Image (cartoon, rainbow, N blue to C red):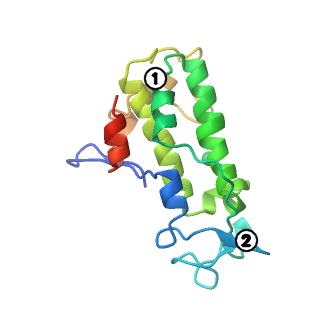
Amino acid sequence: MSRSSNSEKECKGPQMRWRQRATDDSGFGGNGNPPGECVDTSPFREGEFSLSRSAGGGCLTRNFKCYFPNAVHVRTLLTNIDLIEFESSIDGIFHNEVHNSIGGLMARMDAASAPEFIPHHGFIDKIWSDWQKRGNNETYFQDIEEVLPGTNYLPREMLDLEHLPGGICVVYEDPKSVVFEELRC
Ligand SMILES: [Cu+2]
């Protein structure tokens, strides 16, 4: 999972480089095959892996579209100092579009059953963490003093990923990629 205790020396969360991981046959498997879009490579191939009954059962499906954000897109997003614009982009383009571009199970309501779901969300969380570290308007939350629905927590308690309630911390490493190193802002 993406969280571990502060008492550990290091705490890291999973993340993914969307295009590389989502198209890697040896990792999560590649694209699905028509007509059913079932993935037929990797440990998640049809016959080896099946969805839970609550997710409808059957094989893991994918149907790649052409759009995946790259490192340049991520850097551009991080330089956006307006919280509303940042939130709109990370939610709409970086989160939703990647779900839809992977397609198949990731584009369904039960996408959480897909093996790439947690790494995808881990990377979204990393971008959020990187944006916070840049100090961009980080305290601007209109409802910062309102309890988050279904919890006893306030939004401001969730701003610093290294000091979350209950002694939880999350630290993300940068992807080991020359592209990311060259683009470091
Ligand atoms: Cu999602």
- Residue type at mark 1? Thr
Q: Which image quarter holds the C terminus?
A: top left
- Residue type at mark 2? Glu
Which numbered disc flags the more N-terminal residue, 2 or 1? 2
On screen, 138 above or below 117?
Answer: above
Marks 2 and 1, Cα distance to the nearest angstrom? 37 Å
Q: Position of residue 137 (x, y in %)?
A: 46, 14
Mark 2 = which residue?
37
| Callout 1: SS | loop
Q: Point out which mark residue 79 bears.
A: 1
| Callout 2: SS | loop
- Give me the residue at 51% from left, 78% from top: 43
Residue 147 in view (yes/no): no
Which quarter of the picture shows residue 95?
Answer: top right
Count neighbours of disc 2 (C-alpha within 10 A) and say few if under 14, some if 14 to 19, many if 20 or more: some
Q: 140 or 136: which is nearer to us? A: 136
- Give me the residue at 71% from left, 54% from top: 107
